[in-house]
Image (cartoon, rainbow, N blue to C red):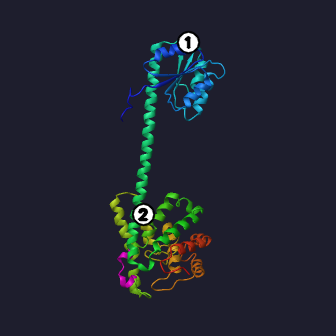
Amino acid sequence: MQQPEEGSRKSTVLVVDDAPENIAAMAAVLKGEYRITVATGGAKAIELARSDSGVDLILLDVVMPGMDGHEVCRQLKRDPKTADIPVIFLTARGNTEDEQRGFELGAVDYITKPFSPPIVKARLKTHLQLKSVRDFLADKSAFLESEVQRRTREVHLVQHVTMVAMGSLAETRDNETGNHIRRTQHYMKALALQIKGLPRFQEFLTPETIDLLVKSAPLHDIGKVGIPDRILLKPGKLLPEEFAIMKTHTTIGRDAILAAEKMLDASTSFLRHARETACFHHEKWDGSGYPSGLSGDKIPVSARLMAVADVYDALINKRVYKEAFSQEEAVSIIRKGSGTHFDPDAVSAFLEIQDRFYAIAQEYADEGRPTP
């Protein structure tokens, strides 16, 4: 670590004493080595210490009329602007109790009158060096904290750009749902924020996790890049063999994200929620979904929330194979799916904010297709 430079400027020492002859004697000892500023009373000393002139150390007489040195020290240490300025008491008193009181107030040293010039110089040099090191370390700590914050912002930006870029691949394949990934992203956020207050979700749905769920939502249908156009864009009901192929978009998406995770070489990837959502958002609460037939709490929370968001959006918007349902019809279908298709708590949360879902659907409606 680079040490703070010495001698780059003269340190400023504030000498506080009600006796002008004492100030003159101290100034004579320190002149040439330090910049000296003086005060003959406590109030003036505090004013000078709080000014922008930059006091580096205070030599403070204990016994003064009006405000004594102890009170001056107490006020200096209470003020964040002056709390770090080293205070050395000057006193004719030599008892232990008096010294103890001074140290308890925050003084760094005691010099007894009449003082020895070499002792004064040695103690000032020591405490100014210590202050210089503390200031250096404080600046270093502030720089490191700023650097950590900057790097953290960069990481979050990389996460966001990665997920949006990957999610846009699915959007280019399925032109019927141009704003689908945007709507489901906002549905996911609204639903997560609504449901996080329930005890069974509090531990999982932290602010950090919700942020990742929202960022990863665009990847839930990324596996559709592997589905042939004749099936993905078919204007009608899929045949059983076609539907079997369509269902593989869940595992295609999972495998694509898993491959990206392996490149990151991390035990816990920010893409984990994206992988779970892509793979399991078609699972059903009663175990009748795909690809793994998971049921209940075995389905990842991210996938359970996306299931509600994805189905709602599919219902409320027109597709190549169906017309759009009304808001009332969509809400009714999701309500009926509680406990069979959907997590009952997720449905309850959805019903409480169904107007918010509808507002999102309107705000991000596909061009030329107003929401019914």
Residue 300 shows in the view = no
Position of residue 245 in the picture relative to residue 344 (left or right): left
Q: Quadrant of the N terminus?
A: top left
The residue wearing badge 1 is 21
Q: Secondary structure at mark 1?
A: helix
Residue placed farthest to the left in the image? 263
Give the image location of residue 174, x and y in percent. 41, 78
The vertical placement of 97 against 342, above or below, is above
Give the image location of residue 236, x and y in percent. 44, 88
Type of residue at label 1?
A: Glu
Other-residue count near label 1 (Cα within 10 Å), few / some / many at <14 / 14–19 / ≥20: few
The vertical placement of 194 against 328, above or below, is above
Identify the residue shown where x is 47% and y is 20%: 123
Q: Is residue 189 magenta?
A: no
The residue wearing badge 2 is 272
Give the image location of residue 193, x and y in percent. 56, 63
Which region shows up in magenta? 223-232
Instruction: Name the quadrant containing residue 239.
Output: bottom left
Position of residue 329 in the picture relative to residue 249 (left or right): right
Q: Are marks 2 and 1 in contact (CB under 8 Å)?
A: no
Instruction: Name the quadrant containing residue 122.
Output: top left
* Front-most of residues 136 and 20: 20
Residue 179 shows in the view = yes
Residue placed farthest to the right in the image? 66
Identify the residue shown where x is 48% and y is 74%: 283
Q: Secondary structure at mark 2?
A: helix
Type of residue at label 2?
A: Arg
Spatial separation of the CA atoms under disc 2 and disc 1: 75 Å
Position of residue 258 in the picture relative to residue 70 (left or right): left
Give the image location of residue 56, x and y in percent. 49, 27
* Front-most of residues 10 and 179: 10
